[in-house]
Amino acid sequence: MASATVEETGQSAEVQAAAQVHWTPKHNKWLIALTVTLATFMEVLDTSIANVALPHIAGGLGASQDEATWVITSYLVANAIILPASAYLTTFIGRKKFYMMCVVIFGISSMMCGLAISLPMLIVFRLIQGAGGGGLGPSEQAILADTFEPKERGQAFALYGLAVVAAPAIGPTLGGWITDNYDWRWIFFINVPVAILSLILTSRMVEDPPHIVAEVAESKRKGLNLDYVGFGLLALGFGSLEFVLDKGQEDDWFGSHMITAFIIVCVVSLVSLIIWSLVQARKGNRPILNLTLFRRKSFAIAFTLLFVLGFSLYSSTVLIPQFVQTLLGYTAELAGFVMSPGGLIIMFMMPVVGLLITRVDPRVMISFGFLLMTSSLFAMHQMLALNSSFKTVMWLRVWQGASLAFLFIPINTISYNGVPRSQNNDVSGLSNLARNVGGSVGTAFVSTMLARRSQAHQQNMTMNMGSGNTAYNDRISGIAGYLQSHGTAAVANHSDAIAAAQGNVYNMLHSQTQMLAYLDIIAVLAVFTTVMVPLVWLVPKPAPASSETMAH
């Protein structure tokens, strides 16, 4: 596919010419990859590590559990705003400086989060932390795309995948361990030395390629001409979207006037942002979002697949720990151990898939990944029960984890197919946005469907729990007789035994309805991943790596 025109991208001929220059970094590319992965791993870890510490944070700062959830929401809202804007901001200050600024902001705000003496103070610093962290992932992915030739990107993205896929899996375990053995403040303090090390390595190892240097020089010549309208619409749109997804189920969605208002703001802002960005691109200006990328079929489909990947990854990361803690009685630490082997299999499979990507059609690997995930979800639907063993749940998670490597690397690889190097930043920003928004939608889906389906199953099952149902009466009598024969103080007479028996049956009913709700969620996820397979084959067959390299 031919390179995009100046009118489509808002980039000058000089910038596009600089992107054609063959460039290789001065330092070892794998050391560069390790350097930028360090801070990104830290940032992705922080999206999940605080979840298990919320009760301790609430208690330590004298707040309620509901108020403490703003610690999570504030981070996600700021993160969602900066993610898509990162490519645009790079244009004005350079990618290396932008990346280092994000690390500095993230490190200082992490320290201030740990020192916070009140909940409002903690929320403010979490907002700042989310803004700093939002620029790390897209910047790293763009750095890798420029540092490695197309034929090597699969291996580079394998390293990146270890950060963004494995970190959410080990975050709850690490957060639980730190909170139980030390203090919740240390989940923030541990970021500080990592940020310092990342800054030192980045300053020495990372450099901007010619097209980034040309973009910065051009922006200096033209003066600071920020897209204030675009940024405002972006902040309103994605900030509102993240708020709605995080608080929707808690406030009963459209039953809440506040949630309804934020949904309206979100829709109006995002529609206006799309129109504004397309108009600016047509005028030859540089909009905050480069939506012309969606004219490329491979990128548009990859964006959709990354959304589904984020949806599947985060929904299962929420679903399984919640299932084992609420229904199987696991502690937070034991729930983390159930998830950890799945993270290990991802770490093992990523390098393998990174090597295969140069030999196998990415579309074949993505199809295999979705089918593997579907089979794992089908197995979960058949095998998960109220008496499931630790081993069963663990191996089901390992099975599912193996599929993620076959999705993350090939999807990210095809998203760059045919895209000029000068637009790598735009691709990485929108790709990370797709995955993160997908994760937020997946998390909201699990919490909403769990509540709604549990209620629906409970209504259906309680219809048969009346005094006229012989099986129900026999069950109550049997339990009451057992309790009376064992002579506990709580059942001194027959009426007490009947009441205790009814409570016992209700507890069993509640567990059964929640179990059925979990199975409903798993079934929907299985259907969702299955229908993605035909979509994969709408992607044009990728060009050989050598020819793509020449195109750059």
Image (cartoon, rainbow, N blue to C red):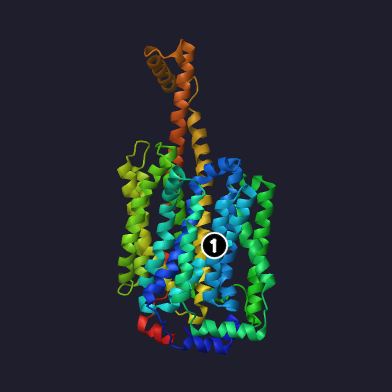
Res 426 seen here: yes
Q: Amino acid at mark 1?
A: Phe
Say which quarter of the image contains residue 539: bottom left
Res 530 seen here: no
Eyeballing the image, is 546 above or below 82? below
Residue 78 image point, x, y percent = 60, 60
Residue at image coords 56%, 61%: 108
Eyeballing the image, is 160 above or below 341? below
Say which quarter of the image contains residue 347: bottom left
Residue 477 image point, x, y percent = 42, 16
Eyeballing the image, is 161 above or below 378? below
Viewport quadrant of the C terminus: bottom left
Residue at image coords 64%, 57%: 240
Say which quarter of the image contains residue 35: bottom left
Residue 156 image point, x, y percent = 38, 71
Relative to 263, is 214 on the left or the right? Answer: left
Front residue of 141 and 116? 116
Front residue of 368 and 38? 38
How many residues crowd around disc 1 within 10 Å: few (fewer than 14), some, or many (20 or more)?
A: many
Residue 453 image point, x, y percent = 50, 41
Residue at image coords 61%, 40%: 62
Front residue of 291 and 190? 190
Q: Considering the numbered disc 1 on the image, is that residue within a helix, a strand or a loop?
A: helix
Front residue of 157 and 261? 157
Q: Which residue in the rendered view is the most extreme toward the top?
A: 493
Residue at image coords 68%, 62%: 268
Q: Which residue is mark 1?
A: 106
